[in-house]
């Protein structure tokens, strides 16, 4: 069991800055593309921050994650907020919903954790099945360029309650994968307990994402340099993709 499995609140401390940016940016994207939303799924929802923002809009909301610890924290937050969110533990490559929704999101480079094109294909196929005709799938991904230039031989540090976290990353140009070793010291009374785990992300080219999306039955509507409306390029750090299920299927 990893550090984020044991202490989901550490994940929140790590993620909250991203969430505070992605939620208003998402609103801008939905307005820009005239998306009409009344139901939504946040895929790889973590501790539920984005899903709770959907529920606050009055949308029928689902949240799916593979981690029981993350989902436990998400349910706790939903109960505290009086929010109605249907959380479930499922794999993004094989998930199902009771019925299609008008929006699916997957943020914080969660799709980069799928380490093969086949995994991506399965996930995009499941998303297409989960969307209504005309529904949107919005997601962000780290680019190969950023994994190579931002993650290679780099060290990051996070200090929060109840832990201090050091992240050391490296990039493998042959596989296109970046790995980060997470070393955390979690306070227990007057002492600290040490945890070590390793995360790996796979870089995918813009052409690969387009091919996988279209093969799964989704149209590419736009690709933005994340948090802007500038067109994405292979040298973008993170790309925000706007895809849609055609209305004439």
Image (cartoon, rainbow, N blue to C red):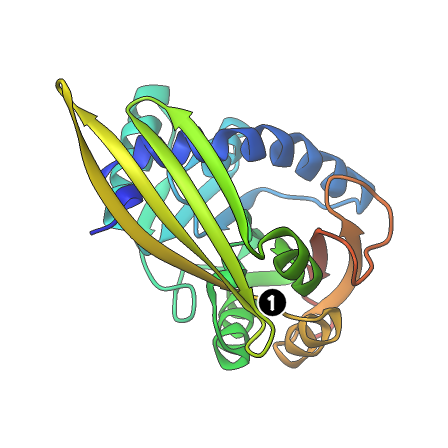
Q: 171 or 204: which is nearer to us?
A: 171
Quadrant for the C terminus, please. bottom right
**Image coordinates for residue 162, horizontal then vertical, percent:** 28, 24
- Report the residue at 61% width, 77% height from top: 216
**Image coordinates for residue 92, horizontal then vertical, percent:** 42, 64
Rendered image quadrant of residue 5: top left
**Image coordinates for residue 181, horizontal then vertical, percent:** 39, 53
Q: Is residue 247 above or below residue 89?
A: below
Q: 183 or 4: which is nearer to us?
A: 183
- Report the residue at 25% width, 39% height from top: 72
**Image coordinates for residue 21, horizontal then vertical, percent:** 64, 31
Q: Residues within 10 Å of mark 1 (few under 14, many from 20)?
A: many
Check the image and name the residue furthest to the right: 230
User: Tag 1's secondary structure?
Assistant: loop
Q: Is residue 221 above or below residue 103?
A: below
- Report the residue at 50% width, 70% height from top: 123
Q: Which residue is tagged 1?
A: 203
In this rendering, the count of numbered labels is: 1
- Report the residue at 57% width, 35% height from top: 18
Side of 9 relative to 154 (left or right):
left
Check the image and name the residue furthest to the front: 153
Kindly tell me whether residue 135 is visible in this rendering: no
Kindly tell me whether residue 153 is visible in this rendering: yes
Rendered image quadrant of residue 191: top left
Q: Is residue 99 above or below residue 53?
A: below
């Amino acid at each position: 069991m990893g550090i984020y499995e044991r202490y989901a609140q550490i994940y929140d401390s790590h993620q909250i800055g991203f969430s505070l940016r992605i939620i208003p940016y998402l609103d801008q994207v939905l307005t820009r593309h005239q998306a009409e939303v009344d139901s939504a799924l946040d895929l790889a929802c973590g501790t539920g921050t984005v899903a709770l923002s959907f529920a606050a809009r009055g949308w029928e909301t689902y949240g799916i994650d593979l981690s029981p610890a993350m989902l436990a924290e998400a349910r706790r937050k939903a109960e505290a907020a009086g929010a109605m969110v249907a959380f479930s533990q499922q794999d993004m490559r094989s998930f199902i919903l009771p019925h299609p929704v008008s929006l699916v999101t997957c943020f914080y480079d969660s799709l980069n954790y799928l380490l093969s094109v086949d995994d991506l294909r399965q996930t995009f196929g499941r998303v297409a099945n989960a969307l209504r005709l005309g529904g949107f799938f919005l997601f962000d991904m780290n680019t190969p360029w950023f994994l190579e230039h931002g993650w290679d031989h780099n060290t990051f540090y996070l200090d929060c309650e109840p832990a201090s976290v050091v992240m050391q990353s490296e990039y493998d140009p042959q596989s296109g994968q970046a790995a980060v070793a997470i070393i955390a010291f979690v306070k227990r009374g007057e002492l600290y307990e040490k945890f070590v785990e390793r995360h790996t992300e796979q870089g995918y080219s813009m052409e690969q994402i387009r091919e996988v999306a279209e093969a799964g039955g989704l149209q590419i509507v736009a690709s933005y340099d994340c948090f802007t409306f500038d067109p994405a390029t292979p040298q973008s750090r993170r790309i925000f993709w706007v895809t849609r299920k055609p209305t004439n299927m």
